[in-house]
Amino acid sequence: MSESVSCPDHVDVLVIGAGPGGYVAAIRASQLGKSVAVVDENEPGGVCLHSGCIPSKALISAAKTYELFVNSKHNKMGIAAQSVSIDYAQVQQWKHGIIQKLKNGVEGLLSGNQVTYVKGRAQFKSGNEVRIDDGNRSKIVKFEHCIVAAGSRPVELQGFAFGNRIVSSKEILQLKEIPQSLAIIGAGYIGVELGQTFAKFGTKVTLLEYAPHILPTFESELASIVEKKMKKNGMQIITGASAKAAYEAEGGVTLTYTHSGEEKKMDADYLFVAVGRKPNTDPLSLEAADVQVDQKGFIDVDRQGRTSNPRIFAIGDVVKGPALAHKASYEGKVAAEAIAGHPSAVDYKAIPSVIFSDPEIATIGLSEKEAVEQNYKVKTGKFSYAANGRALSLHAGEGFVKVIAEANTGFIIGAQIVGIEAANLIAEIGLAIEMGSTLEDIAATIHAHPSLGEIVMEASEAGMGKGVHSL
């Protein structure tokens, strides 16, 4: 390894990881006058772009389109389609085209902001040095500050090693064919999103969840509406189930699990293990840089992302909190600004969480239960999609918007939405929380008619006890 990796010997800021946290942090640091290099062993964009957020949403969109055509003869619009088919190779090619376009965009942003991109694996040698190895060459790079944005990877359960037929969230998105049958362990957001996707493509999907209901980290009134649609899609949902073992065979896999005290077996073409993710901190040799991690591998940070080594910051999936791309990007900006001497600090009160299920779920701030547990006196407003003209014209009357406010002041402190375009509707409430707005502020804002946005307005009016279109 005599030839050096193409990277400066010294940089002001070295970013480890080029995902939505890392590349955003790198760009912001460069904008603030720092010399910056970002190192990643994979392509720019990270898991989110290449094997997570973007490819999964592309497949979700394709499945939804296919479902519309297939079910057209069952709807009341008077539109029917004949001989609908899927060319899954073309679906995958279309998905890859989206990824490639966005990857090129990230590369252009890094280059345009004078950020050096280095393909290789980073490992700390000291508190201000990293060895970068690309498999053929290596180099020691010194930094004034470092931002660790190494991301996460799927949890591999003992006895369920990933292989040809036992797959993670990465492999399930890259299948060359639509499986006839699919077993899924875990009914969190990844299992639900992709389970519904393949069910719409025609796969017989069985979903196993240890908790009493799907999406266990979300309130049951949200999850129940999605579960109803999943069953309509033909999915079998088994809650209170515990997976025990899996055995690959030619052309399939056999899963053993327990349910209601009985041991059972099922066969499927593939087994998709979707039980969470773990931080990519173990390969970094963080101990060499005096960076402290907890027992689960998460890096301890302050409100600016600073670790136990004041030169080194950490953001995204390697720190505690939900593994969300937009959270990582936000933290990346804060860390870069802190390095540049700005008083930036994280404030998580208005970070949305979205599930691209059918219908979508979006939450922000506090739920009613959480608010009560934190000793808030609350009032809530709720409005149904079924009473909204635009939702009905979209053949999407399932769901509701619920807004939570502090009782005495009317300040909005949270919201839950389940229904079409929930991911977009939650943004208005996020801004309201960030701006310190009240129910009256939203209710007094004129919303276009007919629009889905009216549901947020109507829920706010209902919270004030002044609902016009609700009793």
Image (tube, grey):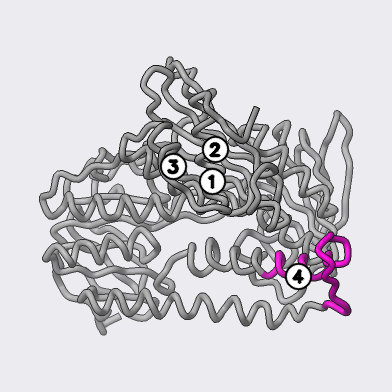
Residue shown at 46% from the left, 45% from the top: 352
Quarter in which the C terminus is drawn: top right
Relative to 426, does residue 19 appear above or below in the rendering?
A: below
* Mark before the other along the chain sequence, 3 or 2: 3
Q: Mark 2 highlights which residue?
A: 458
Q: Mark 4 highlights which residue?
A: 66
Say if mark 1 contacts mark 2, CB within 8 Å. Answer: yes
Q: Amino acid at mark 1?
A: Glu
Say if mark 3 contacts mark 2, CB within 8 Å. Answer: no
Quarter in which the N terminus is drawn: bottom left
Secondary structure, mark 1, is helix
For disc 4, the neighbor class at 10 Å (few under 14, some 14 to 19, many from 20) is some
Distance in Å between CA atoms under marks 3 and 1: 12 Å
Distance in Å between CA atoms under marks 2 and 4: 33 Å
Q: Amino acid at mark 2?
A: Glu
Distance in Å between CA atoms under marks 4 and 1: 29 Å
Disc number for residue 307 = none
Distance in Å between CA atoms under marks 3 and 2: 13 Å
* Mark before the other along the chain sequence, 2 or 4: 4
Q: Mark 1 highlights which residue?
A: 454
